[in-house]
Amino acid sequence: MSKGLPDTRTDAAMSELVPEPRPKPAVPMKPVSINSNLLGYIGIDTIIEQMRKKTMKTGFDFNIMVVGQSGLGKSTLVNTLFKSQVSRKASSWNREEKIPKTVEIKAIGHVIEEGGVKMKLTVIDTPGFGDQINNENCWEPIEKYINEQYEKFLKEEVNIARKKRIPDTRVHCCLYFISPTGHSLRPLDLEFMKHLSKVVNIIPVIAKADTMTLEEKSEFKQRVRKELEVNGIEFYPQKEFDEDLEDKTENDKIRQESMPFAVVGSDKEYQVNGKRVLGRKTPWGIIEVENLNHCEFALLRDFVIRTHLQDLKEVTHNIHYETYRAKRLNDNGGLPPGEGLLGSVLPPVPATPCPTAE
């Protein structure tokens, strides 16, 4: 090799060994607000009206479950909530009738229309809950029913040719009725809520609050909140599902002040100061159901229907149903339900055992 001449073979070999620099991955730019630069009206704000019109055409489903022992006014309260006879009152037991030996699940559907908006309301009652001498595991049929509705929805969802609109029978809200003892929660109350709060949105309510004085009611509400906290029971709205600071501020107030709602239900009207009001007649006067000075029914109604109904549906779909769906598909090896790895039919997710309430 002559001096002063470049070794082209060595240079070529080196150039082959040196990798070319990789292009940097494209980083998406942050969206920039251009409202001030718009040259005219576009119309994107009409999406709300479009959604409203579609909802008015199709309507929507809302499924509410009521749980609690007999005599707490569950049916009356639900009828008062929706201002119609949507739940049948259970007649008092007579000598010829027997108290059900097991918890029954009874679902009654209605279509309610208001202001052009249709709601298919399903009220799920649970007669027999807490009415036995031995109430051990009486929550199991209720959990089984809730999981069966998730399973039904999942089977429709994984169909190749699925329906345009899957019927939604999933339980969006469970009103749990607490007896107004003024003392503490029963072991059954704690056992039920500890277990079912993982699969459904539970809203605790103190029934027949007019049997307590204002001081007793306030103390009992605080005691119930404390017992739920000590036992690690989360009721709706759950803290971890708050989406932003505004949600957190609003829901903290509900969790710390309103819950559990102390309510009185009645579907009878009385004349008070020239107005017709829903209420209960007592020897000392009329208890007005929608008067906040008398009970917290109006707060419960506003919470369930006027401010959080859509969120109840979303938490059911995005949290409780998704948890069920993920577990179901994971247990099935990622295959649709009903088909095992070798084509065998898999059973639904069983009810998990509940620890003995302290």
Image: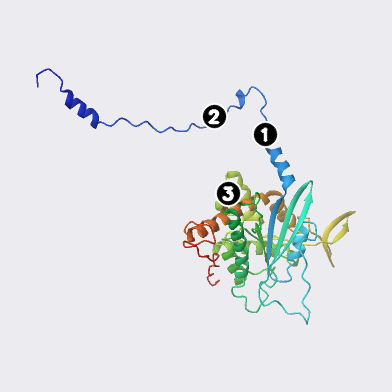
Mark number, residue 305: none
Q: Residue 234: which quarter of the image?
A: bottom right
Q: Are marks 2 and 3 in contact (CB under 8 Å)?
A: no
Q: Quadrant of the C terminus?
A: bottom right
Where residue 2 appears, x then y in whole percent?
9, 19
User: Given the current orientation, which residue lies at the most extreme left position?
Assistant: 2
Determine which residue is flagged by label 3: 242
Determine which residue is flagged by label 2: 32
Of labels 2 and 3, earlier in sequence is 2
Please state which of residues 164 and 201 is positioned toward the viewer in this rendering. Answer: 164
Disc 2 residue type (three-letter): Val
Badge 2: few (under 14), some or many (20 or more) residues near its Cα, within 10 Å? Answer: few
Disc 3 residue type (three-letter): Asp
Determine which residue is flagged by label 1: 45
Where residue 34 appears, x then y in whole percent?
58, 27
Q: Nearer the viewer, mark 2 or mark 3?
A: 2
Where residue 97 appears, x then y in whole percent?
76, 79
Of labels 1 and 2, earlier in sequence is 2
Q: Secondary structure at mark 1?
A: helix
Q: Secondary structure at mark 3?
A: loop
Badge 1: few (under 14), some or many (20 or more) residues near its Cα, within 10 Å? Answer: few
Q: Secondary structure at mark 2?
A: loop
